[in-house]
């Protein structure tokens, strides 16, 4: 029997944070964590740098091309100090919070602040479907915009755009010529050039020829940066923890 399509996988959301009973001590805040590991940053303007990845569990989107569906489920509930301790133990200055969707869990916000306080450069990889305005201003936000072939284009939270700044990056994953034309029109109409650090275009691995996208960008003189998922050329595309 073949594995179900990503769109068919059920959505499991993180449980609501429980308040302690009256008279009982407050519980330490936690996050459900799928994995923490050190690797090379494979995307964004930070590509090629050693990076610690803190991957949270749960996502409420089901993009057709998702390559991290394993993070939809399964994880360990960890206190924020323990997560910080694990991340700092690698002695790597760059840390990315990714998922899943980190912003589904409210305690991702204080975690990012704690990592910044510890002197780390902190990146947030987020789907663009959730409010980014409360993220610590020291964090570099890498926010997706979902193109039509993802199946989740309607979930784009356009209200996030005014909160972006020159520390942030916008990423659009392309699966077809139609996705590219959608991205081109959005980039032109939204004037991202003066708004964010970079607009990143990438291909669904193995589905769209990167050379074709580069040719389209050159023909359109599109003010965007093309990127490949570097880690998938170093290790097998389905390998985890890299």
Image (cartoon, grey):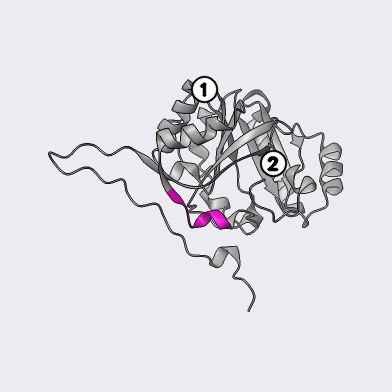
Q: Residue reaching furthest bottom?
A: 1
Determine whether the residue tagged by mark 2 lies in a helix, strand or loop.
Answer: helix
Residue shown at 77% from the left, 57% from the top: 207
Residue 100 image point, x, y percent? 53, 49
Residue shown at 48% from the left, 50% from the top: 57
Position of the C terminus by quadrant: top right
Decide which of 57, 59 is in the foreground and name it.
57
Magenta highlight range: 70-76
Q: Residues within 10 Å of mark 2 (few under 14, many from 20)?
A: few
Determine whether the residue tagged by mark 1 lies in a helix, strand or loop.
Answer: loop
In the rendering, which numbered label is found on residue 185? Answer: 2
**How many numbered circles does the render carry?**
2
Q: Quarter of the image holding residue 214? A: top right
Residue 158 image point, x, y percent? 52, 39
Decide which of 26, 107 is in the foreground and name it.
26
Magenta-span inclusion, residue 212 = no
Residue shown at 46% from the left, 41% from the top: 103
Decide which of 45, 154 is in the foreground and name it.
45
Q: Is residue 14 visible?
A: yes
Q: Quarter of the image holding residue 215? A: top right
Separation of marks 1 and 2 at Cα, in angstroms = 30 Å
Question: Which residue is labeled 1 in the image?
Answer: 138
């Amino acid at each position: 029997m073949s594995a179900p399509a990503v769109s068919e996988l059920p959505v499991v959301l993180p449980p609501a944070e429980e308040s302690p009973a009256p008279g009982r001590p407050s519980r330490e805040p936690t996050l459900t964590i799928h994995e923490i590991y050190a690797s090379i940053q494979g995307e964004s303007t930070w590509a090629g740098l050693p990076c610690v990845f803190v991957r949270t569990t749960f996502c409420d989107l089901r993009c057709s091309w998702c390559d991290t569906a394993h993070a939809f489920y399964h994880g360990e509930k960890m206190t924020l100090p323990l997560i910080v301790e694990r991340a700092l133990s690698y002695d790597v200055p760059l840390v990315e919070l990714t998922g899943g969707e980190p912003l589904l869990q409210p305690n991702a916000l204080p975690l990012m602040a704690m990592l910044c306080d510890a002197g780390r450069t902190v990146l947030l990889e987020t789907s663009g479907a959730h409010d980014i305005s409360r993220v610590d201003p020291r964090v570099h936000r890498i926010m997706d915009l979902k193109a039509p072939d993802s199946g989740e284009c309607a979930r784009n939270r356009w209200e996030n755009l005014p909160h972006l700044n020159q520390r942030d990056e916008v990423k659009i994953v392309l699966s077809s010529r139609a996705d590219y034309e959608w991205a081109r029109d959005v980039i032109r109409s939204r004037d991202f050039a003066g708004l964010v650090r970079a607009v990143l275009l990438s291909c669904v691995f193995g589905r769209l020829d990167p050379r074709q996208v580069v040719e389209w960008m050159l023909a359109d003189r599109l003010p965007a940066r093309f990127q490949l998922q570097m880690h998938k050329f170093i290790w097998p595309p389905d390998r985890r923890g890299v």
